[in-house]
Image (cartoon, grey):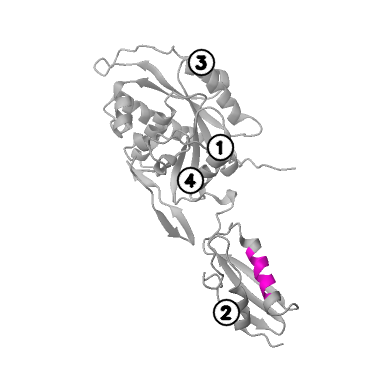
Amino acid sequence: MTIYPKLITDALEKVRYPGTGKDLISSGMLEDSVHIKENAVSFTLIFEKPNDPFIKSVVKAAETAIHTWVAEDIEVQIEVKSKQVARPEPDKLLKQVKNILAISSGKGGVGKSTVSANLAVALAAMGYKVGLLDADIYGPSIPKMFGVEDARPLLERKDGRDLIVPTEKYGVKMLSMGFFVKKEDAVVWRGSMASNALKQLIADADWGDLDFFLIDLPPGTSDIHLTMVQTLAVTGALVVSTPQQVALADARKGIQMFIGEKVNVPVLGLIENMSWFTPEELPNNKYYLFGREGGKELAKEMNIPLLGQIPIVQSICEGGDTGAPVALDTDRITGRAFHQLAASVVEQIRLRNETMEPTKRVEVHIR
């Protein structure tokens, strides 16, 4: 029997792609002409994504169609390609980022996101290239703190992939789940869904060249923390707490999580937020509302630096609510405090990189 291309394409017209219900030919899934050599046929099928769930079934159906409608003894070779280039392997993610910082807290309500936002702004003001990922999937607050709640990041085609373009303000590139859901809606997801969303915000975004990539984590310890250390080699962690004993107890657990053998991420230091209350009009007055020197004592106990003490001033709350982080104004007490914190963080990272080996991504081995 003589085999010619029309016989093959006619057979492929009988195969439907489950995702659309259309046949392979009208869907444009046949990349180029069919190659025939004696009793062998070869061609290429194009799928939208490299992880298309129907690849195996479609390839099998195409082989069956040719054997059924052309000849049973034909040797069929089908190559598979995708329009979108596959996501880079984990060890190749964010290769243009110099330092990855996880910002964590043992419990909620200690101002972790406020610290993350203002630290990012202060680092950018120092001339560094900064990215900020709001990884608090269930309670994203970074969009409001930067006044970009209505932002809707676009997709950009780059190197064969569709990448999310981060929103940029005050010199900080940022992404948050808050950009992709209505601000009045609650995010009700299982852990696996939240973890996949985090991976997408990391791996499928065009972060570009960055000196510092800050990850604002959810409070406590969760699947998100594990996903992060399994996805990225984190340079170091910053732990935020208030001087209050109940907050310090949870901060201690957070520190232990990072330095534990299974995670092994260096804790660069502790940041004490809400250290004291100072009225703007009385800058020399300090009122210790949540206890005194608790952060200093915990840092000494855990043998880590106390990187900064941030006072409570009304302007912190106002800045977060209006989308203008207080670190933008170095004439204010808290603005100066965040710039001093940024300088301490930069110095601590320098020491870490000079004296320690690069952090390794946590690998999961399934037995």
Question: Taking 234 as reference, is 76 left or right?
Answer: right
- Residue at label 3? 246
Q: Alpha carbon of mark 1 to alpha carbon of mark 2: how far?
A: 45 Å
Q: Which kind of residue does numbered mark 3 sit on? A: Val
Quick one: label 2, few (<14), some, or many (20+) residues within 10 Å? few
Give yes or no for residue 180 being in the magenta stretch.
no
106 or 282, nearer to the observer: 106
178 or 99, nearer to the observer: 178
- Residue at label 2? 33
Q: What residue lies at 41% left-to-right and 57% top-to-bottom?
A: 156
| Dominant secondary-structure state across the stretch colored magenta | helix
Question: Taking 336 as reference, is 226 left or right?
Answer: right
Q: Is residue 199 above or below residue 115?
A: below
Question: Taking 146 as reference, is 230 left or right?
Answer: right
- Residue at label 4? 201
Of the two numbered discs 4 and 1 on the same chain, state the one appearing first in sequence. 1
Residue 364 place in picture, x, y as percent: 67, 42
Mark 2: secondary structure: loop
Q: What stretch of residues is rendered in magenta?
A: 58-66
Q: What residue lies at 28% left-to-right and 16% top-to-bottom?
A: 279
Residue 216 place in picture, x, y as percent: 46, 35
Residue 332 place in picture, x, y as percent: 28, 25
Mark 1: secondary structure: loop
Of the two numbered discs 3 and 1 on the same chain, state the one appearing first in sequence. 1
Mark 3: secondary structure: helix
- Residue at label 1? 190
Q: Are marks 2 and 3 in contact (CB under 8 Å)?
A: no
Q: Which kind of residue does numbered mark 4 sit on? A: Leu
Residue 14 place in picture, x, y as percent: 60, 72
Q: What residue lies at 37% left-to-right and 38% top-to-bottom?
A: 143
Mark 4: secondary structure: helix
Of the two numbered discs 1 and 2 on the same chain, state the one appearing first in sequence. 2
